[in-house]
Structure formats: C-alpha cells, structure tokens
Amino acid sequence: MQSNLVMFPNAGVVEKSTKTEERTVTKYDRAEQQFIELLATEDLDNILDVEAAKVNEFERILSIAIRAAYQNDCGDRLAHQFLQRILYRINRLKLFWYDDLRHYNNERSLYLCSCRNQIEAAWQDWELAQIDVTALQQLDVKQVLIERSSNDLDPPLSEDSKYIREQMTEAGYRHLLAISSFDGLVEGSRLARILGGAANEVQCTLVRVLLEEYGNGRLSRKHSTFFAQMLTEFGMNTQPEGYFDLVPWEVLACANHNFLLTERKRYFLRYNGGLTYFEVAGPGAYRNYLAAAQRLGLSAAAMGYWELHIKEDERHGQWMLEDVALPLAEQYPDDAWELVLGYDQEKLMGDRAAKAVVQSIRKAE
C-alpha cells in the first residue's frame, strides 16, 4: 500500500547541501580565476615552474571536475560548467576578436593544449557513450539522412516550444537574446575554419553558406549585425561574449564540440553531418522565437534576425543535404556513417542546450 506519510527535508541536511554547493562554486570559481591568470601570463610554457603552486592547484581542481562530470552517473552540473568554460577559454583563441594582440601570446601553448586534450578526452568519451555508434555503422546513410532531415524540418511543437510561443514574457525574451548572443554575434566563425583546401562542388556550397551568413561581405547585411540590432532595441550589450556568465554549460558544449570537429580534419564528415542538422532544424526554432516576439508586439528590429534566418536557413538546409552531405556519403562510402553520427550528436546536444536555455529563461522571469 502506498504510504501517505509526507517526509519533510531535514533542515540540517538542506543547510549542509547548500553549504556544500557554495563551497564547490567557490572552489571552481577560484580555479577558473587561476586559469585566467595563467592565460594572461607572458610565455606561459617557459614559466610553469615559477607558477607551480597555481598550476598544481588548478590541475587538482581540474581532475576533481573531470571525475565529477564524466565518471559520476548523475553528472555534477557545476563541474560541467567549469570544464566547458575552461575549454571555451582555450578554444576561443582560435578566433580573432580584434582586441589586444597580447591576448594571443599563448595561443599555441603546449600546456593549454594538454589541458584541452585532458578535458576533451573524458568529455568526448562521455558524449559518444550516449549514442549507439555500432548501430549507425549499419545504416543506409543516404536514406537515413534524407529521412532525418525531412522529420526535423518541421517537427511537432514540444512543451518547451509551446512555452516560448505562448507564455514567455518580454523579460524572458531578453534573457533568450542574452544567451543566444553568445553564438549570434559571431555566427559562422567555426564554419570558416573548414573551407580551405582542394576545390570542388562541396567546398563551393559551404562557401556559399558562409557568404550568406557573412552578408556577402557587407557588414550591414551580416547576420551578426541583425542580431546586434535586436539587442540594441532593448538597450542590451552588443559586444561578443557580453553575457558569457549566463550561458549554460549545455550551450558551451555545443560550441566546444564544433571547435573540436573543425580543428580535426579527420572529423570533416561529422562536422558536416552536424551542420546539416543545424541548418535543417534551425528554422523550426526561429519560428518559435518569432511567434513569441510577434505575440509580445515587439518592433521589426527586435525580431529581424529570426525572420532572416527562417528564409535563408531553409535554403541552407537543402543545400547542406543535397549538395554537401549526400555527395560526401558517395565519396566516402566506408566512412559515410560519420555523417549520421555528426547529425545525431548535433541534434542530441542541441536539444539538451535548448532545454537548458528554457530552464534558464523560466528562472529569470
């Protein structure tokens, strides 16, 4: 028989749990600050002995976080956040931010590389464990990509999608813009990293996608400019990474994952599979945001980025499927399953990030 006894939490247990989380936050915050100081250290690799105490303490916390995030069934949220922030601080050095040139002094640091590799090794194993890779290798890749793209082009509305469309407040919309600006203000940057090399139709299609994202070389038409205009409508910060501290680890993980895939040419198929999903599924999400903005009676400038993307990404999704993914599947038949792996990972991680964003919006409202 089901008990009707209501168990109230022990006040001492709640207090202890809260204090534990506070100590953990402080521990990770301190370690991240130590890492930021190391990043700014001139000629880092050659003065590690001088900074031994700081390095050793950072590495101790790094090891704790890796165990807590990836070797623990429940996964520690704070550990995930710390690791993805550290990884992003390393990865962002692969882009140019038009800031102080001294910020790039350690961009090829072997020590930073070792930190990145240590996090990525544990993290990527954890991510891959969530997908049946063996099953993917048995699929008819071209047929699966066509079917997945068709299903993801206009999926049924989820509860989170309905919330955004029907309930999200203007404060929630501003919070959405703040988090989305993390990618929206530097859109297309990672795609640019895979375009060099031999010329063929696939490369030219990818260049066309990038050119449209970059406004065909006109700043006024660049997609990031449209995003900045949305922020300006609310008097918000238009500087890249201006709301970095609001970004959930799930969103950071998507960015870091794409840094990895574009860094390694061996992952070229995985990246393009993921980009295919991103371009195919994008309009569905943007329609939700546009519907919310229209319901709230916002100005055209406050929603222009979504309108632009709905039109252009529908075309980009078709290009990515027909002119990139399917031709690559033909060119690399033995490895074509990696396109599906990239597609499925991008969907899995994107759905996880979208859920985290909605949770963050609800808390902010």
Image (spheres, rainbow, N blue to C red):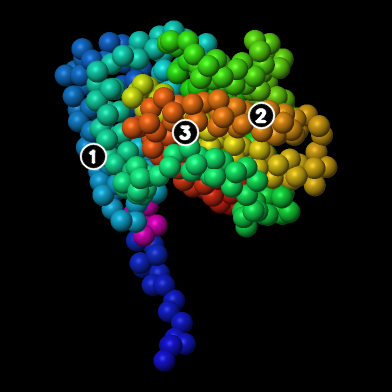
The amino acid beneath tag 3 is Gly
Cα distance in 3D space between marks 2 and 1: 44 Å
Q: Nearer the viewer, mark 1 or mark 3?
A: 3
Q: Is mark 2 in CB contact (under 8 Å) with mark 1? A: no
- Where is residue 100? Give x, y as percent: 47, 10
Residue at x-position 80% and y-position 38%: 298
Res 331 → quadrant: top left
Residue at x-position 27% and y-position 35%: 121
The residue tagged 2 is 315
From this viewpoint, which residue is outermost toward the left?
49
In the displayed structure, 312 sits above or below 135; it is above
The amino acid beneath tag 1 is Ser
Q: Residues within 10 Å of mark 2 (few under 14, many from 20)?
A: some
- Where is residue 192? Give x, y as percent: 50, 17
Q: Main secondary structure of the magenta part?
A: helix
Asked if residue 39 lies left or right of residue 243, the reply is left
Q: Confirm whether residue 28 shows in the render.
A: no
Q: Residues within 10 Å of mark 3 (few under 14, many from 20)?
A: many
Asked if residue 275 lies left or right of residue 213, the reply is left
Asked if residue 233 lies left or right of residue 279, the reply is right
Cα distance in 3D space between marks 1 and 3: 32 Å
The range drawn in magenta is: 17-21
Residue at x-position 23% and y-position 15%: 45
Counting residues from the start of the chain, the first of labels 1 and 3 encountered is 1
The residue tagged 1 is 63
Cα distance in 3D space between marks 2 and 3: 16 Å
The amino acid beneath tag 2 is Arg
In the displayed structure, 19 sits above or below 343; it is below
- Where is residue 252? Give x, y as percent: 46, 36
SS of the residue at dot 2?
Answer: helix
Residue at x-position 43% and y-position 34%: 339
